[in-house]
Amino acid sequence: MWDSTLLAHAVPGRFMSPEVRPVVVRRNGDVLPCLLVDGQVAGVWRATGDGLELTAFHQLGRAAWRGLTAEAENLSALLAGRDPQVYRRHGHWWDKGLPGGESVMVKG
């Protein structure tokens, strides 16, 4: 939730563009769970009752989605026995809408 790499990195824009930062880093300092592609924030993810929802901020290539899906399957297996409601505090940010918007569901 408070990823020090994303919050305090000395080089602005190193991990995320200035346009993405206000979406990922909320005014209260919370950092949404991020998707990284080639070291850059490319989207966000959240736990749902059915697994994980991955949302990219822009079009991603097939290889990027393959890598993200493989990681999400591993994470989904790790979270399988846990209550997804723990992550509900992030839900209202999805309800308000996210930029871009190709999404993929990875079943748990």
Image (tube, grey):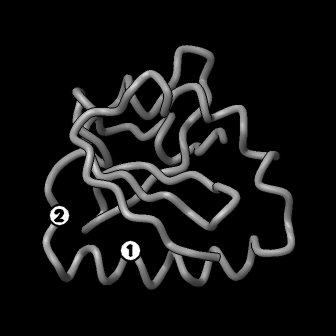
Q: Nearer the viewer, residue 79 or 36?
A: 79
Q: Spatial distance from mark 1 to mark 2, Cα to Cα? A: 10 Å
The image shows residue 82, relative to residue 21, as above or below, that is: below
Quarter occupied by the C terminus: bottom right
Q: Secondary structure at mark 2?
A: loop
Badge 2 is on which residue? 60
In percent of width and height, residue 17 lies at 22, 37
Q: Nearer the viewer, residue 20 or 68?
A: 68
Badge 1 is on which residue? 68
Identify the residue at horizontal 58%, vertical 43% (top origin): 4
Q: Is residue 41 visible?
A: no
The image shows residue 33, relative to residue 69, as above or below, that is: above
Left or right placement of residue 80 versus residue 19 in this view: right
Label 1 or label 2, whichever comes before in sequence order: 2
Quarter occupied by the N terminus: top right
Q: Nearer the viewer, residue 61 or 50?
A: 50
Left or right placement of residue 10 versus residue 7 in this view: left
Answer with the quarter of the image where residue 81 lies.
bottom right
Identify the residue at horizontal 48%, vertical 29% (top origin): 25
Mark 1 vs 2: CB contact within 8 A: yes
Task: Return the mark for residue 87.
Answer: none
Q: How many C-alpha atoms fall within 10 Å of the one at disc 2: few (<14), some, or many (≥20)?
A: few
